[in-house]
């Protein structure tokens, strides 16, 4: 009888433990589910706030945002003039134009550093192309030819898609073959932030 009673008590205790563990697991599962749901709601709210601030300007043309007062260099300008322009202005990209005002190419800071610091570059990066560029005497001989451009009537969405796809910080704006401006990531961010702030102010007033 004692053995039987002990066995029954042991089994009963075991059953009690078994019943408690699933309940504990369910509680943990519920907590994780609630946390996941809350995280999902927070993410949705975050993305909704971004869309709310940007959707109003996605279809505005970049003509309203681009910089028109450009610093450019003629394709026949000596390399030293190019160096001086980069030293004088805080730009990362310098458009190169021909005598008709058409965009011929661009020169960026990477090219300038490549030329100025060629002697410090690893030997495996010394290619015929970099050597030829380092010997260039004018803007035309060191520029990147056929740069990606965008039309004057393109939208903010068009510009942002192009920048994110190619990882550009700036894109030159063309109108009938003529360089008319440049649009940057900073221009896009400033406009979207301005719209978000405006939308936030309206919601507070309401």
Image (cartoon, grey):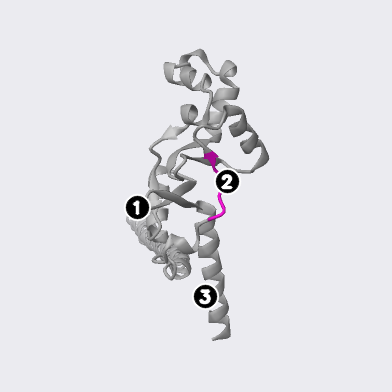
Residue for badge 3: 199
Q: Which mark is residue 53?
A: none
Looking at marks 3 and 1 on the same chain, the residue that comes earlier in the sequence is marked by: 1
Q: Position of residue 113 (x, y in %)?
A: 58, 28
* Nearest-to-viewer mark from 2 and 3: 2
- Identify the mark nearer the N-term, 2 or 3: 2
Q: Residue at x 54, y 80 (%)?
A: 202
Query: Which corner quadrant holds the N terminus?
Result: bottom left
Q: CA distance from mark 2 to mark 3?
A: 35 Å
How far from the left and from the top, in percent, is residue 106? 47, 38
**Residue 21: where, in percent of width, then height?**
39, 58
The disc, 2 or 1, on the residue closer to the chain's N-terminal end is: 1
Over which residues does the magenta segment extend?
Answer: 68-73
Task: Examine the structure image and report whether residue 151 is included in the region drawn in magenta.
Answer: no
Query: What's the residue at 38%, 61% (across, down)?
Result: 153
| Secondary structure of residue under mark 3 | helix
Q: CA distance from mark 2 to mark 1?
A: 98 Å
- Residue 197 sits above or below residue 68 on the image: below
- Pointer 2 residue: 71
Q: Main secondary structure of the magenta part?
A: loop
Q: Position of residue 10 (x, y in %)?
A: 37, 55
The quarter of the picture where residue 159 lies is bottom left
The residue tagged 1 is 3
Query: Are discs 3 and 1 less than 8 Å apart at CB?
Result: no
């Amino acid at each position: 009888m004692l053995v039987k009673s002990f066995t029954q008590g042991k089994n009963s205790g075991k059953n009690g433990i078994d019943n408690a563990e699933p309940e504990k697991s369910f509680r943990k599962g519920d907590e994780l589910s609630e946390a996941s749901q809350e995280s999902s709601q927070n993410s949705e709210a975050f993305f909704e706030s971004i869309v709310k601030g940007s959707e109003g300007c996605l279809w505005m043309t970049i003509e309203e945002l681009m910089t028109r007062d450009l610093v450019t260099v003629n394709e026949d300008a000596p390399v030293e003039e190019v160096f001086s322009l980069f030293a004088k202005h805080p730009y990362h990209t310098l458009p190169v134009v021909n005598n008709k005002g058409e965009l011929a190419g661009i020169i960026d800071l990477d090219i300038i550093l490549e030329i100025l610091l060629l002697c410090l570059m690893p030997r495996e990066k010394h290619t015929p192309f970099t050597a030829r560029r380092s010997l260039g005497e004018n803007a035309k001989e060191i520029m990147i030819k056929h740069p990606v451009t965008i039309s004057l009537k393109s939208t903010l969405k068009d510009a942002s898609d192009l920048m994110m796809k190619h990882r550009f910080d700036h894109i030159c704006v063309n109108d009938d073959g003529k360089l008319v401006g440049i649009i940057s990531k900073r221009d896009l961010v400033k406009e979207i932030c301005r719209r978000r702030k405006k939308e936030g102010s309206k919601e507070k007033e309401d």
